[in-house]
Image (spheres, helix red, strand yellow):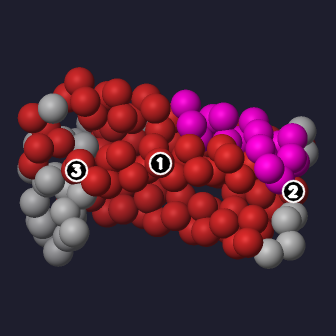
Amino acid sequence: MFSKKMLTLTLATLSLSVAGGALANSGLKPEEMIKFRKASYNFMAWNMGKIKASLDGNFNKDEVAKAAAAVATVANSGMGALYAPGTDKDVGGEKTRLKSEFFKEPEKVREIAMNFNAQANEMAKVAAGGDVAAVRAQFGKLGDSCKACHDRYRAK
């Protein structure tokens, strides 16, 4: 279960995420969208790394649960608002590896994104249970959902 502190942090993050989505829809520059989404993905990667390290070393249920909750929070934050035409090119000093195909296949993007959100939410639920075997299995599914987007829409 979430501690009161973790629940407060999660709700605060969600509030900021909603505000961020509203800002994206109200005039963020393309370079700001790229910057914010890269920061979000870096934050998720850092938390995925914490989960992996725990699975590879001494499993720490509480740390894994916190990291999984952080990934799920970002996954559900409405990051789609940070993808707009023009954000598939380097702009304003911000570099991106987003392929232009991303904007040509909206149904496939939606399918991949929905699967990622579902896997992130399941990861948070499984991690809260603390069963290391179940966490390991779900971590693989979550990683596969990340890879599906990377393989299709991220330039090397």
Residue 82 picture quarter = top left
Mark 1 against mark 2, which lies toward the viewer?
A: 1
Q: Residue 124, percent across and down?
A: 71, 41
- Amino acid identity at mark 3: Tyr
Q: Measuring 46% from the left and 66% from the top, which residue is drawn there? A: 42
Q: Secondary structure at mark 1?
A: helix
Q: Measuring 32% from the left and 54% from the top, which residue is drawn there? A: 150
Local crowd size for mark 1, using a 10 Å CA cut-off: few (<14), some (14–19), many (≥20): some
Q: Is residue 2 left or right of residue 115?
A: right
Residue identified by numbered label 3: 153
Local crowd size for mark 2, using a 10 Å CA cut-off: few (<14), some (14–19), many (≥20): some
Give the overall secondary structure of the magenta segment: helix
| Earlier residue among tags 1 and 3 | 1
| Earlier residue among tags 1 and 2 | 2
- Residue 126 shows in this picture: yes
Residue identified by numbered label 2: 61
The region drawn magenta spans 118-134
Q: Is residue 156 magenta?
A: no
Give the residue at the far top of this rendering: 107
Q: Is residue 37 left or right of residue 152?
A: right
Residue identified by numbered label 1: 144
Q: CA distance from mark 1 to mark 2?
A: 22 Å
